[in-house]
Amino acid sequence: MTDSAIAASGLRKAYKDKVVLDGIDLDVAEGTIFSLLGPNGAGKTTTVNVLTTLMKADGGTVRVAGHDVATETKAVRAAIGVTGQFAAVDELLTGQENLRLMADLKRLGPGESKRVVADLLERFDLTESAQKLAATYSGGMRRKLDLAMTLVGKPRIIFLDEPTTGLDPRSRRTMWDIIRRLVADDGVTIFLTTQYLEEADRLADRIAVLDQGRLVAQGTPAELKRQMPGGHVRLRFSGDLELDSALRVLGDSTRDDENDLVLRVPSDGGARSLRTLLAQLDAHSIEVEEFSVHTPDLDDVFLSLTGRTSTKVDAR
Ligand SMILES: Nc1ncnc2c1ncn2[C@@H]1O[C@H](COP(=O)(O)OP(=O)(O)OP(=O)(O)O)[C@@H](O)[C@H]1O
Ligand SMILES: [Mg+2]
């Protein structure tokens, strides 16, 4: 026995002759948030479908909540909740009716059903809209209702497929808070997919980057960022004269692509190296107008791993 909530090894899946998952290994510890990050078509939803028993893998093994997804489907389903990429809300029912329906499906008694539904409406700030048809809800409200429906059965492991895609910044933050509280208060495990680097960075204990069916990196957000070179100092000068002198004095500096008066100097951003850098400039009486330190962010990681920028991913 391990305390892994989700453990997959050598997971493979193809649609006809198109390989979508090409040997995926992952391990998600209980009570943590794991984020699967990847561009459109990377295989995120396919991974979720296999881990949640909605789809059979062609190869490999997956254990969820200690049960084999291929042979112990029922036990796995009892332990998990899934909020799919596209809301499972019934538009012709009210928010409250949608939740009651879930409670019935989960076979809660009438008293408990009432209590659980009222509690969830309250928690997701939907009490006021509870009697309105879900068809009249905004995208953000629908997402919240969808997640509330997932929580009816008190699952220990929750799969969220792109829970914040299409939400405005405020609703996204609300969703993040809800997810964090689920982990902090109830100790559930969250497996979430996203295309947003910032989301993975803010929420996840561990991140795996999926690209064309393979995991191209795994680790904590900090570990992934550390793998990246790309840290540098930007120096802005008042004129070409200063910049040219600095270029001569500082060995491996390069001109910035976007700004003629800016130099980029590779640096780990530490106090010691910054002091040395400034002292070098000082010794040659080179004036610097502006000075900034850049540490690599997950955008750099994504770009270098998948050969695409996240902006390009978002725009597709
Ligand atoms: N039922 C299917 N039949 C054939 N091909 C499929 C099927 N479902 C998905 N695919 C293909 O598998 C690949 C991975 O799809 P998947 O939906 O898992 O990607 P994703 O990472 O969830 O993408 P998105 O960010 O757009 O949701 C894509 O190339 C897709 O076209
Ligand atoms: Mg998807």
Image (cartoon, helix red, strand yellow):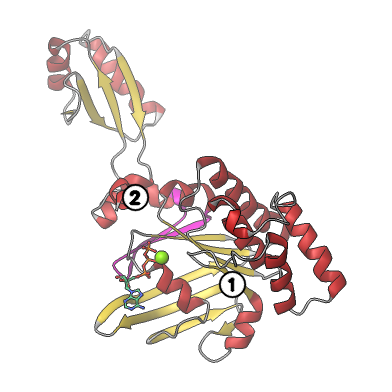
Assign a secondary structure to mark 2: helix
Residue at 84% across, 70% down = 112
Q: What stretch is highlighted in magenta?
A: 204-222
Assign a secondary structure to mark 1: strand
Q: Where is residue 280 in the image (x, y as percent from the top left)?
A: 25, 17
Question: Which quadrant of the structure image shows residue 258?
Answer: top left
Q: Where is residue 92 in the image (x, y as percent from the top left)?
A: 61, 66
Residue at mark 2 to residue at mark 1: CA–CA distance: 30 Å
Q: Which disc, if any, is residue 314?
A: 2
The secondary structure making up most of the magenta span is strand
Is 208 magenta? The answer is yes
Using the image as rendered, state which of residue 207 and residue 78 is in the foreground: 78
Residue at 38% across, 86% down = 59
Mark 2 burial class by Cα count in 10 Å: few <14, some 14-19, many 20+: few
Q: In this rendering, is residue 97 above or below 62? A: above
Q: Which disc, if any, is residue 5?
A: 1
Mark 2 residue type = Asp
Q: Position of residue 219 (x, y in %)?
A: 44, 58
Mark 1 residue type = Ala
